[in-house]
Image (cartoon, rainbow, N blue to C red):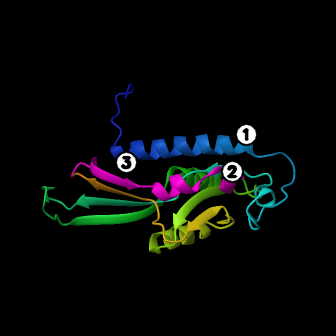
Amino acid sequence: SSSGRVTSPRGLGVMRAAAAHRRVAHLADVTAPPGPRSDASGEGSRGRDATAGAVVVIGGMVLDVQASPGPGASLLRGTTAPGTVRQNPGGVGRNIAEGLFRASPPGAPPPFLLSAVGDDLAGGALLEAWRKLGRVSAAGVRVRAGDTTPTVAAVLDAGGEVAAAVADCDTVEASLDAPWIQ
């Protein structure tokens, strides 16, 4: 940095997270309608009543799977390396909606997420994690019978960079059609 101090990677992450939080808080401030809120619970049917005064976010609700080799382990084609595998709720739409929810002032209507998941284990886990946030509604998340939940699986190298990744997001891309959104 220009001050001569060296910032650790962890310090940079904290600074970036704080900057992102400020940006999301600003977005929440400029998009929240003034005055009393008509539906702070976020419950109800999908449609105008459930979204009254809320920011509507349209996008993916995705299971992010990240695998990284353990210390001293190498990634070699055709082999298995000991390491760590993490599964987290993700997807750009879901992440934005969660950020808006967390940055919103008390009493503000929660964002309304329009997305799609499959009726599988991953879809159930994502919906459960979404509901655990609190006042958010899952009414706008379309559960597609027989479809797989959007998933992104990434293998990270020893330095934490993506070595390879596969994204299976057909369900959300095919399911967020105009009739569902309206």
Residue at figure coordinates x 66%, y 61% from the top left = 140
The answer for how far apart the CA atoms under marks 3 and 2 are is 33 Å
Is 110 in front, or is 166? 166
Question: Which element type, helix, strand or loop, lies under badge 2?
Answer: strand
Question: Which element type, helix, strand or loop, lies under badge 1?
Answer: helix
* Mark 1 or mark 2: whose residue is earlier in sequence: 1
Which residue is label 3 attached to?
10
Q: Count of labels shown?
A: 3
Which residue is label 2 attached to?
56
The answer for how far apart the CA atoms under marks 1 and 3 are is 30 Å
Which residue is outermost to the top? 2
Q: Position of residue 30 (x, y in %)?
A: 73, 39
Magenta residues span 158-182
Which residue is label 1 attached to?
30
Which numbered mark, 3 or 2, is in the foreground of this view?
2
Determine which quarter of the picture holds residue 84.
bottom left
